[in-house]
Amino acid sequence: MDTDVLIVGAGPTGLTLANELLLAGVSTVLADRLPQRSDLSRAGGVQPRTLEALDQRGLLEPLLATGEHPVGNGHFAGIPLPLGSDEHPLPWRSVPQVVIEGFFEEHLAAHGLRARRNHELAGLAQDGDGVTAAFADGTVLRCRYLVAADGAHSTVRSLLGAAFPGQAGTSTVVAADARLDGADAVLSHTWNEDGHWAALFPLGTDPQGRPLRRLVLGGPDHSLPREVPVTEEEVRRGLDTVFGTRVRLLGLRYARRITNASRQVAEYRHGRVFLAGDAAHVHLPLGAQGMNTGMQDAFNLGWKLGAAVQGWAPKDLLDTYHAERHPAGAAVLRNVRAQSLLMDWAGTRDPEVLAAREIFTDLTGLPEVRHRLAGLMSGMAVRYPMPGTEDHPLVGRPAPDLDLGPARVHELLRSGHGVLLDPAGAFARTAAPWSDRVERVDRVGQGVAAEPMLVRPDGYVCWAGAGDPVPALGHWFGEPR
Ligand SMILES: Cc1cc2nc3c(=O)[nH]c(=O)nc-3n(C[C@H](O)[C@H](O)[C@H](O)COP(=O)(O)OP(=O)(O)OC[C@H]3O[C@@H](n4cnc5c(N)ncnc54)[C@H](O)[C@@H]3O)c2cc1C
């Protein structure tokens, strides 16, 4: 073997996974066909669950220290979701994709892992022991596992002939990175009477340090074939149609047309090859979810591949990647489809759609509805199907970040190991055979109400409450030593 894991694609999914594998002590090659990282952002925002996962790796503070990353409010189909500060301790942040990619690249490089650039995967073959990957420049690499993080037009997906069911795009909108005057004064989504709409979000700064906005323009004038170039004139006209003279274009950095195609691979695992990120799911960028979902795929897969390479993975552990992440991806596609209908993405002004939106907007006045929608958009509502979910409300969900006194739960996860919270000190002998994979913690400050729980390296609770943790230790962390 040349390496344990080959990751194809150094976008946010591949970079996040590379970091997880680094933590798991697994040799990794990260290959990307581009000669250098793009300096254009597609994604502009990081959701609460991703912020949590970064905190669980000790990366949140340094990421946020890279610049101004304002907190934002959520929305569903452009309907603002004013969320109380109790909803998410780590609320949505504006962090452009280029900042995330640059941050991860530097962090990985500091630990000796650099993406191999100009490395385009062109062929692959797998057998019982590993995968042979062939690159366009003629080089060949043999690995135990290969992960496709090569984006929406995934080469790996095509080479596998993997089924990618869903809907083809039916209309387009313009997504532009622009410098604007007057944009601060408008709400994120604005519609006019004839079906034209605009959405505005912060997108960091351009290379000269000037504030950039992500501007999305939709409606009848903008639904053109993808290959039709977007002109400054079209963007100016689009702004004028929705805002009149309130918002002016100062400069256009980049613009593209995006479609409402929506697809998800039928299988996330093909033997020794795994699909993650946009290679596994594509949908409209509504509510800042694509990059976040890909990064969550990586957090889910990383420790499992680590366990397989280190030799302690229980028999079916790698299959749980599909079992857990396919439903999570399907839920994102579902909420995006509902949003695109409710926000009248195509600008039809269909009275039935407008009526549904009016009633839905009214419902978002209810705290319970806001809470449910916030859970969907933030990634916090994901609950993995695992044994014990019927017995305890925490099982399958992200671990609460309890402050135990000496440390917070998220801080305990920074080692990349599992954590067994043992406030009564009852499991010292029970857990000892797993001590190389699971850290048992009984240092709990006075007055801290913490119940026993077992947390996987990706931060999800896999056992909690009364009873014996041994079955769960065996189920997730393999044979005792
Ligand atoms: C306008 C727009 C706005 C968006 N806004 C948001 C947002 O706010 N929040 C959010 O979460 N998401 C957003 N998204 C979605 C987000 O950008 C993507 O989901 C994200 O980039 C997916 O990351 P990835 O690493 O899976 O794939 P990519 O970022 O596409 O990376 C794939 C990498 O693989 C490489 N590659 C491809 N083929 C090969 C090959 N054969 N060999 C080697 N390398 C290869 C590519 O060069 C690339 O570097 C937005 C998307 C768009 C278009």
Image (cartoon, helix red, strand yellow):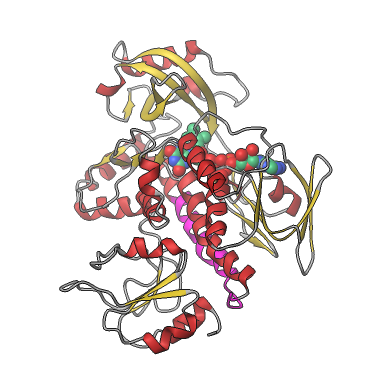
Depth order, front residue of 111/46: 111
Does residue 152 appear in the picture of this structure? no
Q: Which residue is drawn at 31% across and 50% down?
A: 374
Q: In which quarter of the image is ligand 1?
A: top right
Indicate the position of residue 144 as horizontal and vertical percent values: 71, 63
Q: Residue at x 69, y 38 (%)?
A: 33
Q: For the N terminus, which image quadrant?
A: bottom right
Q: In this view, does 234 lie above or below 118?
A: above
Query: What is the residue that sits farthest to the right in this orientation?
Result: 138
- Residue bounds of the magenta highlight: 312-334
Does residue 136 appear in the picture of this structure? yes
Drawn side of residue 383 relative to residue 476, left or right: left
Depth order, front residue of 12/360: 12
Indicate the position of residue 331 as horizontal and vertical percent values: 45, 55
Q: How many labels does the image show?
A: 0
Drawn side of residue 249 relative to residue 221, left or right: left
Q: Is residue 59 above or below residue 347?
A: below
Indicate the position of residue 382 as horizontal and vertical percent values: 40, 60
**Which quadrant of the view contains residue 337?**
top left
Query: What is the residue that sits farthest to the left in this orientation?
Result: 447
Drawn side of residue 48 relative to residue 328, left or right: left
Based on the picture, tell me whether residue 332 belongs to the magenta stretch: yes
State the predominant SS element of the stretch in magenta.
Answer: helix
**Which quadrant of the view contains residue 193?**
top left
Indicate the position of residue 247 as horizontal and vertical percent values: 32, 15
